[in-house]
Amino acid sequence: MAGATQRLTASPLHLLREALGDRQAIERKLSRAARTGRLWLDSEELERRMRCLEEAGYVVQRPTRVQLLFGALDMLRFVIVPAARDYYGKQGIDFNFHQVLRFLDDPVSLMDPTGILSERDTIIGHLLQVTHLNPIYDLQLMDMWGDGLAELERQVADMVAGTHPRARTIAAVIEDPGYHRRLLDYVRRYRADRRVPDLVREQATIRADEHFAAAERTFATLPGYLEYCRRLPDEPATLTLRYLTVRRFPVEQEVRKGASSGDRSPGASG
């Protein structure tokens, strides 16, 4: 298969070994996991990040932690998982095995689907590891750090050049040989002009479902996600009941473009 990546040509056992990496790679993963766990307990760091997002115009009124949690669960079940199942199914890739490879390459990226309590390099690694439905959400997360976008561009360029420290393990996961070059071009254009059209993955079939399309438009951007979270009930019991009983994204709860400061274009992140 001309131009195919290792992900599409290597044996499952080889992919498992490559995704896991050597002893040093495993030690780095465990260290990142421990640091991420500490971040979840660091209320001062969450405060700093939310303040950065406010200054960037991404949030006007802050959602609570429990609203962020249940908003993340909705993002997963209404957009990320169905879009990934549809996409990988059309690639002839087993969705469940692919998640195993993602976990072995970087377990931390699966611990925090929103990225709000992840390290900068974990978010960048996630962007490198997954052919995104739309990376705009993750690029907006980079505004939590002064050097976020510059460092993202540097690491994507390293990935394209084959010199990134995680190039070997990511090669066992990424299925699209042209993704990193497209991502690098998009990051550079976005840094020059944030009004640049989004880098949206083609998935016309699933977008024909109005519930998925409304959910995708809502969770496309960081402002959309944060505003959706803010509108959720704030009682844990009510949120739990809603999670257990609501099976499809309620189209009437879509966060329309421009409904939240900083909101922009359609798409979704992971």
Image (tube, helix red, strand yellow):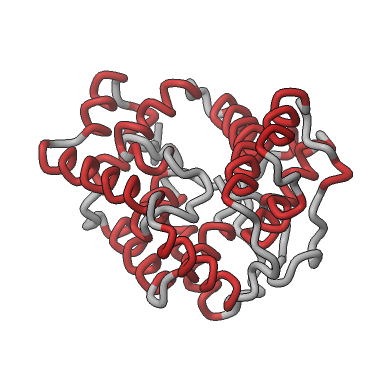
- The image quadrant where one finds the C terminus is top right
Q: Residue furthest right?
A: 252
Taking the image as shown, residue 18 lies to the left or right of residue 50, namely left
Instruction: Provide residue 238's location: percent of width, then percent of height.
Output: 74, 34
Instruction: Provide residue 85's location: percent of width, then percent of height.
Output: 59, 27
Residue at x-position 46% and y-position 44%? 112
Q: How many marks?
A: 0
Instruction: Provide residue 119's location: percent of width, then percent of height.
Output: 36, 57
Residue at x-position 59% and y-position 32%? 81
Taking the image as shown, residue 223 lies to the left or right of residue 35, namely right
The picture quadrant where one finds residue 105 is top left
- The image quadrant where one finds the N terminus is top left
Position of residue 50 relative to residue 200, above or below, is below
Residue at x-position 43% and y-position 27%? 98
The picture quadrant where one finds residue 55 is bottom right
Q: Nearer the viewer, residue 200 or 72?
A: 72
Position of residue 188 relative to residue 229, above or below, is below
Q: Nearer the viewer, residue 232 or 269?
A: 232
Position of residue 158 relative to residue 81, above or below, is below
Residue at x-position 27% and y-position 59%? 161
Instruction: Provide residue 50's location: percent of width, then percent of height.
Output: 54, 66
